[in-house]
Amino acid sequence: MTRVGRNAMKFLLLSTLLSPLAAVRRLNATGVTAPSVMHNGQSIDVSAYSEAMQTSFHIVAKVKFNSMNANYPNILFGHDGSSMCFTSHGLGPAYGAKKGKACFYLQTSTNLGPHGRGIDYNGGWLPSKIRLDDQQWHKYELIKGVAGTALIVDGQRIEDQLADVEKDSSKFIMKRCTKIEVGKAQGKSGFDGEIGDVQIFVQGKQVFGPSLGSYDLAHGIAPTGSSDSHWGRFYGATDGLEDRVWHSKNWEHPSYLTLELAVPSKIDGMKILTPLNHLNYGFKTLEIFRSDDGKSWDLVRSDTVNECKKGRVSEHDGWGPVTKFVQIKMKDRCGGGAFAIAEWQVFGVPAENLAQGIVPSGSSDSKWGRFAGATDGKNDGVWHAGNGDYPSSLTLNLGLATSVSGMTLLTPAGSPNYGFKSLKIMRSMDGTSWTAVRTDSISECTASRSSFHPGWPEKTKYVKIEMSERCGGAHFAVVEWQIFGTQDKCKGKLLPESNDRFPCDSIKDETTCRKSYMKIPTGETFQCGVRKASEDVSNCLVVSECDVA
């Protein structure tokens, strides 16, 4: 049984942004600003991420109670329409001396632990250390790690996990969630207050809520590395639980951990927490590497940390280029025969998906899924090639000269047959003359397969992908095609509107047109040759020539 509520240095997951926001609202007594977006009463659809959430998630919100007179006032409640997967509610009059605090627990699909809640502590549920019945805003965080849970209110953390999960973490799987009810959305819960700035993070990716700056991109993504041991598996470094650690094998030197981020990202910095119970597990030298493909690595720098103590938090600066893979190599032990990490946090912002909302063209689509489904930003939309179309291709006009840092392709959840085994990637500046970048091979064929494809150094305006070697069936399909990178900006004067030069007939506001579809910052104009790509006004403006600012 692990210790709960220890008086140690608190390592606040996501609570400290490396690029702090300008607080324009007055702080309340707890030091928490009012939310920028209110979510009380909202029902959030998380069905697209239900499988991943069964393993790990992190939910952040701001909560204020006007009163706590109901026995079980709902804060956040997850379910699949018929049964609960997790709940977090206030503790009302029925809880006596604990009235005014809050709790968090979940239900495991394996019925693990007391009442199937997965942890030993307190009958399977975590009570907050802090009262919330004070009409003040509080920062509220729920964490499901691979091997346990945590509840954090205003930085005060309580966490626990079952000891036998270390032997088989597959037991600690939560029941499936498709909806999360916020506050009053649960109906008769008796919640009296406000909830806002709800953010949901799943496997290092923000899937709901306002973007409030840098966040921990590593949470819930199990790293790989040189070794782990029965004292601490790889996932212990990134599951959000301070008591659960990664521990290398004895006498391995140096030791390293490698993390594949959900999407290419701009890294603002990192924090590393060494175990709370012993100072010997720390490093004195940390080499930091980045990579676009997980094969070719660039050394960012080598940091030196001279202090050796229990629960040491070391901070490490970020770097400029976006990256998909991060590796840390630990040298010079503080003592003992192994390295160990309680939490490795990688703060940053995902790169912008330049493809979203731009309708591609291609070899074919069908009534089962039009071209727009490949880039609509939704996991329930899909592009579906016509039966017998082989090889199948998609072409996207990015509008401006683009340095592509990487792409991801997600295949449908319904069947593994929709995937490809071979992907030919091509680039072009005019959409007519094509240059092959390379051909990527994937042997795995599974439903909901996500594949990452590194970028290339040459700039391009058009990207084409050609799929061959079907996983099965008679067609290919893509749920989401994401392209990450940076684009040149245009300058000059907006050309006069005409059907052949500026085809925005049904969009009267030219500023809205170029801001929405040209991705040019507000206040900037351009002087570019343009042509009509299709009758679809969502693709109203396509740049072929441009003066780079």
Image: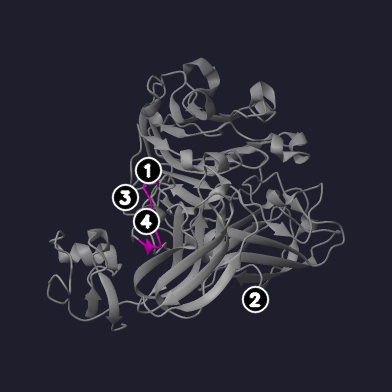
Question: Which one is nearer the viewer's eye here, 538 or 549?
Answer: 538
| Residue 342 appears in the rendering | no
Question: Which one is nearer the viewer's eye here, 419 or 277?
Answer: 419
Assign a secondary structure to mark 2: strand
Residue 249, quarter of picture = bottom right
Q: Is residue 315 above or below residue 383?
A: below
* Residue type at the position of mark 1: Asn
Provide the residue designation for mark 4.
Answer: 371
Which residue appears farthest toward the front when viewing the image?
388
Say which residue appears at 61% left-offset and 70% top-offset: 290
Task: Decide whether residue 254 is among the magenta residues.
Answer: no
Assign a secondary structure to mark 4: helix
Residue 262, quarter of picture = bottom right
Give coordinates of residue 44: x percent, y percent: 40, 37
The quarter of the rendered structure image containing the C terminus is: bottom left
Task: Please tell me the numbered disc located at residue 25.
Answer: 3
Please state which of the two labelled residues, at mark 3 or mark 2, is closer to the viewer.
2
- Magenta stretch in the rendered image: 360-368
Which comes sooner in the sequence, label 3 or label 2?
3
Badge 3 density bin: few <14, some 14–19, many ≥20, Cα 10 Å: few
Provide the residue designation for mark 2.
Answer: 299
Please state which of the two labelled residues, at mark 2 or mark 1, is closer to the viewer.
2
Provide the residue designation for mark 1.
Answer: 28
Say which residue appears at 52% left-offset and 42% top-offset: 414
For the residues marked 2 and 4, what is the alpha-carbon distance in whole angstroms? 40 Å
For the residues marked 1 and 4, what is the alpha-carbon distance in whole angstroms? 49 Å
For the residues marked 3 and 2, what is the alpha-carbon distance in whole angstroms? 41 Å
